[in-house]
Amino acid sequence: MAEIKSLKNPLAERQLTLFRAIIAGLGVVILSLVLVGRLVQLQLLDHDVYATRSDDNRMRVRIIAPARGLIYDRNGIVLAENLPTYQLEIVPEQVEDVADTVTALAELIDIPDRDRERFYRRVDQEPSFRSIPLRTRLTPEEVAAFEVNRQDFKGVEIHAALTRRYPLGRLAAHAVGYVGSLSEADAAGLDPRRYRGTQRIGKVGVEAAHESLLHGEPGSKIIEANAQGRTLRDLEYQGPVAGENLYLTLDSRIQEAAVTALGQHDGAVVAIDPTNGDILALVSQPSFDPHLFVDGIDYVTYAGLNADPGRPLFNRALQGQYPPGSTVKPVMALAGLDAGVVTPRHREMCIGYFMLPDNERRYRDWKRRGHGLVDMHDAIAQSCDVYFYQLALDIGIDHIHDFLSQFGLGQILGVDLPGEKPGLLPSRDWKRNARNEAWYPGETLNIGIGQGFMTATPLQLAHMTAMVAVRGHGYRPRILAARQEPGTRDLIHFEPTPVEPVNVADSGYWDRIAESMEAVVHSVQGTATRSGAGASYRIAGKSGTAQVTGLSQEDEEAPDLLDVPRELRDHALFIAYAPADAPKIAVAVIAEHAGSGGRVAGPIARAVMDALLEPES
């Protein structure tokens, strides 16, 4: 026992216990200091950072897209409007699995394959933090079904939105255009700040041409939400600025009359006010439903439109380039008078064909037995090709090109719509540069009757007719008449833009041409007499038939229309202005593969003019 007691060292044990207590105390102090320091850092030094993070958990910034401006016709009839709707949107970065979320939502709300395809395409194209629409135009029942189950869908919300509607639909699709989904290619050329929250942009027509006026400025609001994402209150709001309303030169009554008159024919109608260049009607048939593009068109539907042999997406009024045929004969006659190579009383013998010296080829007249002895007045009224073969040869291609170009042929007119084509007014230089070939006299003959290399758009023919109507004074065609800033009633009108006038050696030449064009419609031998029957006003016009394929040299008679395959039939054209003594409207019509211009296209033009001049008939 004595030996065991001798082994104990109380002093050493006390020192060890004290050392351990000190170490433990120091540890507690150090840990306490660390804790206090961390609290100081969190509560004082980094307070702003974590306060912001906390706010981010309960506050969200939502961009508010501006309301798109409305589009009206010249009489205040709505052509494009906004309708309220609800749309289902998903923020991809806020959901665990996008595909599973879509599948779950489909059990509550019908989601067509087209909407799914469009949604997944945008998921691949856009940042994951952006809210992407899955379904638009939800019904009240669908909204209620989602709201009941909202807690099960984090990152999914229903937002109120506006969708575009076009009351005239197909009737004005090529003129008014449509909006479609904003693509990466679209966004690349836009101000990203101005287009925050924007999902649609103008694609064609007025919607595209005047996008900058229609779009407006976005707004924003900060909202407080609970853990389930439900909005509790708005904390801060900056309202968007709506786009400007636009008033067009189009007249809905005339537009509808043109569509109705064109009927089942593929083609185009353009009507212009000669006194200011206002486009009163712009029709291209066949047309399409613009609403197909508003919410994003699916691939199958779009491919079907592109594959349609009628090419409904093709704007024939601005982009169709056709041989103008005999519609150019009035300005060709004016060119001859101005050049001094012919007088109104000069006559030519028409035996049904024309031959160049030392050339066996026969350049045939549309009337195979000929017109006999005709002067300029008769040649225009009866559309004698032989007269204009000789006239074109006498004028020469150089003067023809220079004179006709003054009427806007062969060039972009500068209408405020996208996609306009220039047509072709050929010349020696053009052929040399384009084909490295010389110009031949036979090609001049073809130009004399609006055939050969020469092409023009319906818009150009309407513009040419308008310039003839006002004796060489014209205006650039336009479709935008005025704009209206948001929140105001005042209209800001745009002034018409005059073009360089056509000056001729004797102003009386205009009267000779006008008289001849009246004879086309109102004389017994005119080629479009049925177009003027019963009219309360005088019409000055010119029919035209543009060959799609040539007549064999061995054929003495023109084939019957029904004996020719449709795709090889001639195009029917007609130009006119009225009233002849005080023009208010100039019209150009083309009906593809319809045959006679006087018989088919003339009555179409008459119906369009009646809509303005005899609206109650």
Image (cartoon, rainbow, N blue to C red):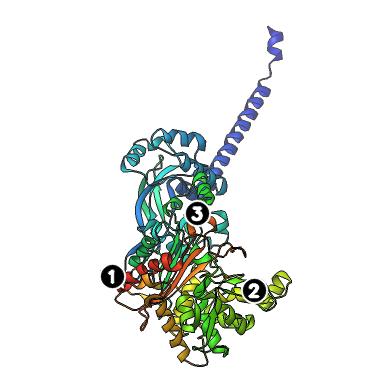
Q: Which residue is at a point 25% across and 69% down the rendered structure image?
A: 616
Measured as percent of width and height from the top left, residue 68 is found at 40, 61
Measured as percent of width and height from the top left, residue 310 is found at 50, 54
Image quadrant for the N terminus?
A: top right
Q: Which residue is mark 1?
A: 615
Q: Which residue is at a point 41% across and 40% down the rendered structure image?
A: 227
Measured as percent of width and height from the top left, residue 129 is found at 52, 47
Sequence-wise first label, 1 or 3: 3
**Amino acid type, residue under disc 3 in the picture:** Gly
Q: Is residue 227 above or below residue 566?
A: above
- Quadrant in which residue 255 is drawn: bottom left
Q: Which residue is at a point 57% across and 79% down the rendered structure image?
A: 405
Q: CA distance from mark 3 to mark 2?
A: 31 Å
**Amino acid type, residue under disc 1 in the picture:** Pro
Crowding around mark 3 (Cα neighbors within 10 Å: few <14, some 14 to 19, many 20+) is: some
Q: Secondary structure at mark 2?
A: helix
Image quadrant for the C terminus?
A: bottom left
**Amino acid type, residue under disc 2 in the picture:** Glu
Q: CA distance from mark 1 to mark 3?
A: 31 Å
Q: Nearer the viewer, mark 3 or mark 2?
A: 2
Judged from this view, the residue extending furthest toward the top is 1
Q: In front: 563, or 195?
A: 563
Crowding around mark 1 (Cα neighbors within 10 Å: few <14, some 14 to 19, many 20+) is: few
Judged from this view, the residue extending furthest toward the right is 436
Viewer can see residue 67: no
Q: In front: 150, or 255?
A: 255
Measured as percent of width and height from the top left, residue 115 is found at 46, 43
Q: Which residue is mark 2?
A: 443
- Quadrant in which residue 273 is drawn: bottom left
Q: Which residue is mark 3?
A: 310
Q: Nearer the viewer, mark 1 or mark 2?
A: 2
Position of 29 compared to 51: left or right? right
